Image (spheres, rainbow, N blue to C red):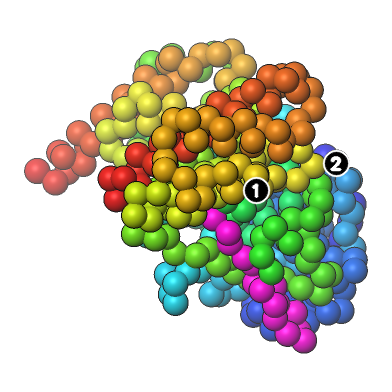
Amino acid sequence: MEVKINVNGTERAADVEPRQLLVHVIREEFELTGTHVGCDTTSCGACTVLLDGVPIKSCTMFGVQADGRSVTTVEGLAGPDGLHPIQAAFKEEHGLQCGFCTPGMMLTGAALIESNPAPSDDDVRWAISGQICRCTGYMNIVKAIQAAAATTSSMSTTAAG
Amino acid sequence: MLPSSFDYHRPATLDEALSLLATHGDDAKVLAGGQSLIPIMKLRFASPGHLIDINRIDGLDGVEERDGSLRIGALVRHNHLASNDIINARYPTIAAAAPQIADPLVRNLGTIGGSLTHADPSGDLGSVMLALGASVVLKSSTGEREVPIGEFLVDTFQSSIAPNELLTEIHVPSPAAKAGGAYLKLERKVGDYATVATAIYLELNNGSIGKAGIALTSVGLTNIKATAAEASLVGAAPGDGVFADAGRLAAEASSPVADVRGSAEYKKHMVEVYVRRGLASAFEMAGAA
């Protein structure tokens, strides 16, 4: 079945089997391997992507379901001016160790700060509670998401002022 | 993990979906949020020949209060239940349960209709709807029927839906003026199934208990309505003593099995504790209403 998906701002088309999971379509058809397959059982969140801006587990959705919709993967975060604030913050705050959960954590973090410009510790921990960091580096993930929120809101203040 | 191959259908209208079900119902599954269905298809516990994706059908995702009941569309996602203003203001049992279902990412996709039809005894919403006395609307190409939730959840992973039917709406009776509710869930971590959970609904009528709803999650072959515990409360003056008695009766109605989450004895004890606490908290809420 032919699907058309807007991936990171670009219209992409692929001929997929209905049983192919979205994560397979992203990795194998679109060759974007930043989206990881972790547990493959809806538990770990390593495969998290944004579907029309909302974080979901791409191992638990078929690729055909994303037909006509927009998907953002970690490759879509950085812009022409360099790293996305969430990426810069993960780098600065040591928000990653092995890096396996990082794409998903950053995407959930980016979606969170869109709706909540100043998330508390609890807000961040709540938002990422469906994702597992096997290195258990949660402290710095939380710090990084909060730092990105602070950067983003100071940028929008500057832009507005 | 890949499921077996299937034919994928994406109807744009309800009529089209019902017609697909009339043709393929025996060998079809309805895909709503997919958060239970896709995992079981990946494990090949289910291998439907046809998958009918209802996500693009308009009009199945509304929440509105009308003619004495709350109507929840089958496609309403758990995160929308959790953030809905009417639910947060008037349906505390649903409001308490919704943010405790699975995890935030699963809640972004998982739906109430899918969750109820899946009929998992560990499902949170089955207990909520039993406690609230809800019913479900089942449509087919030949008609429509409304089924009380207790007759819908018949066995483990088995509802009374016919192969040609689609669950389109859930009806929850509107609460009395003085009402309260709670959903207490004991879980090892976010995303795990409940060790034990209890859904509570309480109405006050001239200082005594007018109506009581109590249902239990993860402690039997289905979500369990604790009818003896409910009956013990109706007409009684609310207080710690009657709440404790109801907790004991609810524990007697449960039949948990030992697993990695705890022994059967522990789970029964937690049913007692959580029903007692849930009733106290629902009573406090009803008194303040």
The residues tagged by marks 1 and 2 sit, at their Cα atoms, a distance apart of 36 Å
- Of B285 and B20, the residue lying toward us: B285
Assign a secondary structure to mark 2. loop
Image vertical order of residue B162 relative to residue A135, above or below: below
Res A149 → quadrant: top left
Q: Residue A144 lies in what quarter of the image?
A: top left
Residue displayed at 50% across by 65% down: B173
Q: Please say if B11 is above or below B191.
A: below
State the predominant SS element of the stretch in magenta.
strand
Q: Residue at (87%, 51%) from the top-left corner?
A: B46
Chain ID, mark 2: B
Task: Give yes or no for residue A59 being in the magenta stretch.
Answer: no
Q: In front of the other: label 1 or label 2?
A: 1
Residue kind at label 2, given as amino acid type: Leu
Q: Is residue A43 left or right of residue B260?
A: left
Query: Mark 2 sits on what residue?
Result: B43
In the displayed image of the protein, which residue is found farthest to the front?
B236
Q: Is residue B272 visible?
A: yes
Tag 1: amino acid: Thr
Q: Which residue is mark 1?
A: B227
Q: Position of residue B5 (x, y in %)?
A: 89, 56
Chain under callout 1: B
Q: Which residue occupies the extreme bottom position in the image?
A: B142
Q: Earlier in the sequence, mark 1 or mark 2?
A: 2
- The residue stretch that appears in magenta: B132-146
Q: Residues within 10 Å of mark 2 (few under 14, many from 20)?
A: some
